[in-house]
Structure formats: structure tokens, C-alpha cells
Amino acid sequence: MRTPPTGLFDRVYELVRGIPRGRVMTYGQVARAIGVPRGAREVGWALGALPRSRERRVPWHRVVGALGRISPRAGTGPLVQRRRLRAEGVRFVGEKVDLTRHGLFA
DNA sequence: ACTTTGACTTGCA
DNA sequence: ATGCAAGCCAAAG
């Protein structure tokens, strides 16, 4: 099995690509899932470097900050993300995603 | 090889 | 609830 310590980007993309519709994960959860417990920032970074080509198949909008926060990157990004999530039936509590309903735990 | 940076998180005031 | 500081890890310059 290939386990190159590098290519963290692809690992993030693969995982995020597997997030079901209507479900969301936090940067921290994704980080742990790919084996980088404290690499939440790296996840955001990987998504930030997400090429247009992969942008279609990687549901980056399903990755939110801790507590369901929408990261304030730049431009209309946050708005688009919120719109897409709502389009999938994701519920919001104020400005945050309702993780008690769409998060991974239960 | 060193410094800077970032779509984060947590803790404390 | 709001804000600031420190911690963390990988990539880019």
C-alpha cells in the first residue's frame, strides 16, 4: 500500500470527496482522519490549493470550522459555501452549521 | 536551510 | 458572546 508521507493534499481531497451529501466534517476531524492530529490548518491549506480541475469533484463546502463555523476566507467564498450547504438540506443555527445534526458524532 | 504564512483550534481574559 | 495569544504542521519563497 502506498504511504508517501508527502502528497497530503491528495489525501485530503480523497477523504473530502467521500463526505456524503448533507453531511459535514470539521477541519480538525479531517486532519485526524488523514493522520495529522493537529493539522487542521493544513487541511484548510490543502483546500485552498484545490485546483479548479478537482474543485468539481471535491465537495470542499462540506468542510467547516470547529463548532460548525464557516471559515472567513476571501470574497464570496463563505457565501457560496453556505448556499451550497443549504441546498443540500444542511441546517444552520445562526451563522453556524448544526453539527448536532450533520456532524459525525451522535 | 531558514523564515513566513495560513479556508484551524483551544484556552483564557 | 468577543477578542487576543499560543500551539501545530506542512508548503512556498
Image (cartoon, coloured by chain):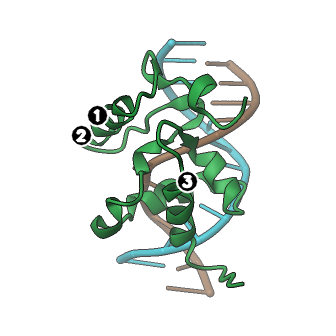
Chain colours: A green, B brown, C cyan
Q: In the rendered view, would you say A90 is above or below A57? A: above
What residue is pinned by disc 3? A41
Separation (CA) of disc 2 from disc 3: 20 Å
Q: What element carries label 3?
A: helix
Lower position in the chain sequence, tag 3 or tag 1: 3
> Residue at coordinates 30% horizontally, 32% vertically from top-left?
A83
Q: Quadrant of residue B4?
A: bottom left
What residue is pinned by disc 2? A76
> Residue at coordinates 55% horizontally, 59% vertically from top-left?
A42
Other-residue count near label 3 (Cα within 10 Å), few / some / many at <14 / 14–19 / ≥20? few
* Chain letter for the residue marked with disc 3 in the picture: A
Please tell me whether mark 3 or mark 1 is closer to you in this view.
1
Q: What element carries label 1?
A: helix
Please tell me whether mark 2 or mark 3 is closer to you in this view.
2
> Residue at coordinates 35% horizontally, 66% vertically from top-left?
A54
Q: Where residue A24 sits: x, y (%)?
A: 53, 39
Amino acid at dot 3: Arg
State if disc 1 and disc 2 touch (CB < 8 Å): yes
Q: Where residue A40 sits: x, y (%)?
A: 60, 51
Q: Nearer the viewer, residue A42 or C4?
A: A42
Separation (CA) of disc 3 from disc 1: 21 Å
Q: Where residue A75 sits: x, y (%)?
A: 23, 42
Other-residue count near label 1 (Cα within 10 Å), few / some / many at <14 / 14–19 / ≥20? few
Q: In the rendered view, would you say A101 is above or below A11? A: above
Separation (CA) of disc 2 from disc 1: 5 Å
What residue is pinned by disc 1? A79
Amino acid at dot 2: Thr
> Residue at coordinates 69% horizontally, 81% vertically from top-left?
A3
* Chain letter for the residue marked with disc 1 in the picture: A
